Image (cartoon, rainbow, N blue to C red):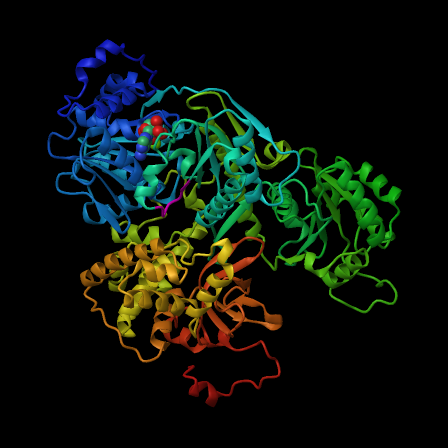
Amino acid sequence: FIQALRMPGSKSDQEDDEPKLSDAERKKLSLQETRRSLPIYPFKKDLIQAIKDHQVLIIEGETGSGKTTQIPQYLYEAGFTQDGKKIGCTQPRRVAAMSVSARVAQEMGVKLGNEVGYSIRFEDCTSERTIIKYMTDGTLHREFLSEPDLQSYSVMIIDEAHERTLHTDILFGLVKDITRFRPDLKLLISSATLDAQKFSDFFDEAPIFRIPGRRYPVDIYYTKAPEADYIDACVVSVLQIHATQALGDILVFLTGQEEIETCQELLQERSRRLGSKIKELIILPVYSNLPSDMQARIFQPTPPNARKVVLATNIAETSLTIDNIIYVIDPGFCKQNNFNSRTGMESLIVVPISKLSFSSSGISLSIVSSSANNPISLANEESTARMMDVTFLSKMNQDFVLYGCETWTLTVREEQRLRVFENKVLRKIFGAKRDEVTGEWRKLHNTELHALYSSPDIIRNIKSRRLRWAGHVARMGESRNAYRVLVGRPEGKRPSGRPRRRWEDNIKMDLREVGYDDRDWIDLAQDRDQWRAYVRAAMNLRASANQRAGRAGRVAAGKCFRLYTAWAYKHELEDNTVPEIQRINLGNAVLTLKALGIDDLVHFDFLDPPPHETLVLALEQLYALGALNHHGELTKLGRRMAEFPVDPMMAKMILASEKYKCSEEILSIASMLSVNGAIFYRPKDKIVHADAARRGFFTPGGDHLMLLNIYSRWADSDFSTQWCYENFLQHRSLKRARDVRDQLAGLMARVEIDLVSGASDTVGIRKAITAGYFYHVARLSKGGQYKTAKHQQTVMIHPNSSMFEDLPRWVIYHELVFTTKEFMRQVTEIESKWLLEVAPHYYKPRELEDSTNKKMPKMTGKSRAELGIH
Ligand code: ADP
Ligand code: MG
């Protein structure tokens, strides 16, 4: 059941509940006034009562209603901390934890870190006195390791539950379990969107407390055609709004720090050029690594006669509320982590919505060759396949794709597209006359793919007309505008005069005749999972688009400018959200759960269980890393790994440094890798100098060693800011690396590893890296391409890597980023024989044999022995 919403108490009821303010200075009074104006305020009394009446309560209220900042204070005022216990509140994002706690400390008139504090990875700003503690969900997850019953808390708030991050999802299961044996612990699940019912069901029908939002209307504008360069489009839109629209602040959504910095630079430059022709424009960035003093600036009120423009990541979607935003610019991109459970590969994907609609450059094509993609399995998976085709292809700017050797799928966005297709491609390639094709197509108009395939009529038709490469177009779904061409198996005679080729080559040749370029080809190799990942990433976007628009209507009627077409919004964005637990690598989570003594993960109480294969893969990976034994139990190494708040591969790398006597170096590398923000500074007007400075840091061996080199030289400069400036390095990022390093060094003491340095060459360092990241190995294959060692996926060295021109035979990479291709970031050269040394249960000598050069003599038993391969 859902408890009916109580009506708010009248204002006069509330007044005697007001906290007695010791310090009554004016500023603080106005803060209290602001607090009273929040939508949650009238519900204060009822909310406290509901919390007293129920152990678990689901709270739903629009972003900005005051859930995060007010509820902990209400609880404090109501005496929930009197027995010396704390109120905890989790946030999915670190910036939110920092900024919200700063705000609450200010509202309560205390110093941040005393009564009100925050704790995030690598940074604990709390003390003995802390009674309201904000933390990231990952931090609370780790706190379970030291305090499995959360004994020091009287209330735990799982905030932003709708974000469904991996850690939040796991916390659901853990806290649900605790409420059973700690009846005194209050649990609040707070969410900004309408999924409260699902949480209620999970928590044994916990009542839902709804806080009605206040919203002003938001007008939504779309672009007429997709934008080619969305950063530029953002800049232009901001300036247009600034020049033509009434005052009111602007919020722009971008995908990350680098983009935000680019946009900021462009805006500064262009508004400078406009000079006094425009009013003052205050440009402020927000992203997760922004230092706190900069974060505070986004909340400062805009001076009169000026306009503030905030460039934010999706942190401003729900976690942070910036008042007085009237205009929102949504380019429709987001960045998402994705994990391929078949190959165990994880990559960061930037998902473009705005490219969905049309490609301006004519038709392009992808090939996927895999025998698994036969028509029958496609037909069975039709709905998935259909969705993948449309969404994926349009994102890739592809009009059609070829897969299996029998099926040809194409998406045609409009009737016009179809005509282009018929004229340009079908007729020429297939030698069919247009009428024939469209005639057939009309007849088949409403035929299901499955029927199409199984119809003997069609097959006969294909055979009798000896269509080799093409047959018929079937419309697969009105709504999706997807078309599929079935291609007959290449049997019978080849067109005369053509040499025997692989079927892909034949088609490529055909296409070249009608004016294609090989560069238009994207060989998706054998991976349909990649598409799936892409589609999943896209699915969250419509929900995001609505949240983003909503940010414009908090204080007055607002406007939202979407830099994509209305068509794209309507047809390409899905409403579903896929929780992180179903799409990312679970290694870290599984390791912590194991360390908590939760061994049966298959039966763990998940809100949405992760796919079985993802769990299995995580277990396998932990086994390969040596964290679990073959019974799936945590090993001594695994226990030590769990001490580190980093992913298992990095934890293993750090621990392996003991054996290779290079813990100092590995710690520097690990902290530089953890910075997760730009290290190099590349101002537009000094690109040449910046790039030269960057090249100056290149270090034989690769990027990891370059990071070490940068850190060491910075340390030699006495951590000088000036030195960073002269060398075009981001001081802020390096400073953060130093903080991370200090934390890691502390943990090293805990697992009793001495910090030593002194390897004369870099082999030990690179072996330690390999001991952790042996899953991330690629080898150079023919044609200068890299393929991953285990799954033969095509990957490329990122152009920003110092190894971009080197092309060593074997490399290890830190991460993959998928934009137009799968790129390896942070690449270092290794030797394949090390893999047998550090991961003997994962790599077999046969897999590491060199197959790139067929002429090379087979390795004899003797030479193998010389290489140390057994
Ligand atoms: P919810 O959690 O319901 O989304 P919040 O409690 O985060 O709402 O926000 C309530 C109000 O507090 C908003 O008006 C917001 O602008 C303000 N606020 C939150 N954090 C800060 C901050 N660091 N500085 C100034 N105002 C803030
Ligand atoms: Mg909130």
- Nearest the viewer among 722 and 581 is 722
Residue 181 shown left or right of residue 339 in the figure = left
The residue sitting at 19% across, 45% down in the picture is 147
The quadrant of the picture occupied by the C terminus is bottom left
The reply to whether residue 654 is in sight is: no
Q: Is residue 772 above or below residue 485?
A: below
Residue placed furthest toward the bottom: 862
Nearer the observer, 27 or 462? 27
Percent x, y of residue 271: 51, 40
From where the camera sits, is residue 472 visible? yes
Q: Quadrant of the N terminus?
A: top left
Range of residues picked out in magenta: 284-290
Classify the position of ligand 2 by quadrant: top left, top right, bottom left or bottom right: top left
Q: Residue furthest left?
A: 83
Residue 477 location in percent, x, y? 69, 36
Total numbered badges shown on the rendered structure: 0
Locate residue 105: give its quadrant.
top left
Q: Is residue 214 left or right of residue 481?
A: left
**Of 323 and 277, the residue lying toward us:** 277
Q: Residue at x 14, y 25 (%)?
A: 23
Left or right side of 373 for 157:
left
Query: Toward which corner of the image does residue 832 lie, by quadrant?
Result: bottom left
- Percent x, y of residue 48: 23, 21
In the picture as drawn, the residue positioned furthest to the front comes out as 276
Q: Residue at x 26, y 43 (%)?
A: 140
